[in-house]
Amino acid sequence: MLQPCCRSARCNGRETRNRLRQGNATAREDVVTDARKPILNRSIGRRSLLLGAGSLGAAGLIAPRLGMPYIGNAAAAEPIKIGMIWAKTGNIVDQAEYLAQGGMLALEQRNNMLLGRPAELVWLDEPNPQGAQQNAERLVGEHKVAGIVGGALSSFALAISSVANKAKVPYVAANAAAGEITGKSCNKYTFRLQPPVEVHTRVLAPYCKDIGKKWYLLTAAYAFGQDIKRSFEEYAKANGITIVGADEVPVSTPDYSSFILKIRAAKPDVVIGGLSASDLTTYLKQWNELGMRGKIPFAEISVGNTDLWGVGPEAADGLYTLTWYYKNPNNPPEEQAMAAAYEKKYNRPAADKAWMGWLGMKSLLDSIEAAKSTDSAAIVAALEKWHVKRGDLDTGYRPFDHQMVNRLLVAGIKPKITDKWDYFDIKAELPKTQADIDAAFGSQADSACKMTG
């Protein structure tokens, strides 16, 4: 599991990649047993262990104990397979580990059964958008999955979504935030858990405006970052805010010093970030090293707990939107039970990404049970009706664009961090009223989604 004492993004990524390589060098392209020991030899092929019925027992994983993949009794029903596409390499790998573990927990809580049959997870890599697309095609063509959960980055999710639409396989994008996914590129088979960038912006931007009216934008040069840049520019224009500088930076940028020097010279009231995962970690560490922490406020939407854990308490700073936090007293009982089960299993708190992986997978598994079938059309119809109660909010996917409607947390970094996991002070849970939620997420008339089929 992740070691919190290793604070740098590079170190965290290296540790996770080493963990993911255990067993065989071809690991990134094959199936898994457990996110802590996820890799099996690709040469095993279709007999490979998927996270399946009977694979988790009181003494641990049966497959490692037997020294071979689990192969069901010949007389048993054919297993139902569910695909996961989460990164095993790259700058998003630390988040992806939690996302995958959350998905595994969702199936494990059902005793690895669906429709009275054994159920198995197949976890493939997403090294880049093309790799995500190819592995989605593998899940559909080779593994015959009933559905897919995945897409750690928006560019990956868009690639998977196109395959899901073509193959007519239900897909839950549990982490990606680019508006296009449930906007102009929406389709009948894709469902998205994470609120889109525009919703995060509408929640956080008023806080940034209260700080000051001179903003500097530092965003990633791909769909997620570009959405952040556009949405904050639109808010600034409508609210009399001046953008004093804006930079788009490549993914996995190792040195932010030139950007930080430009920010310092521009003297903004607040820096609006749009960096993802370990890129945000790297930036905040260098921001602190160059003496900028506490001098100019920093704010960003849709961050992951792991992004800040990687920074460390001495450098963590900023104001953020979160999708979920394990310390939130308003978490419903089922989510509190999930968090307790996760911590018991992995000996660390459930990050927001563990919850997202769990809820995304739960929604798919619940819908397969509700459909009483692995028929794609029946599962899609069930996903459109699926919902859970979160406080006073009925959380589910809207039928016209398949966007989950949910509240966000506005959180700042605690002035003094005494718990190596507990970094955030929750300031608000927004949008508050149903009218505010409708305004933040927009109506069908506002949506760029024109779903067909």
Image (spheres, rainbow, N blue to C red):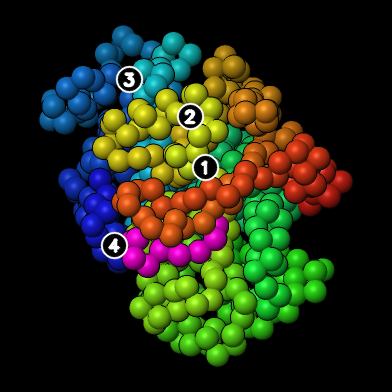
Query: x, y (%) of residue 270?
Result: 60, 73
Disc 2 marks which residue?
A: 335
Q: What element carries label 3?
A: loop
The amino acid pointed to by label 4 is: Arg
Tag on residue 374?
Answer: none
For the residue carrying disc 2, how many other residues have a C-alpha within 10 Å: few (<14), some (14-19), or many (20+)? some
Q: Give the range drawn in magenta.
A: 312-320
Residue named by callout 1: 324
Residue at image mark 4: 7
Q: Sequence order check: which comes first, mark 3 or mark 4?
A: 4
- In primary-sequence order, the first of circles 2 and 4 is 4
Q: Nearer the viewer, mark 3 or mark 4?
A: 4
Dot 1 lies on which element? loop
Residue type (three-letter) at the residue carrying disc 1: Trp
Q: In front of the other: label 3 or label 1? A: 1
Inspect the image, locate mark 2, and give the three-letter code of the amino acid beneath it. Answer: Glu
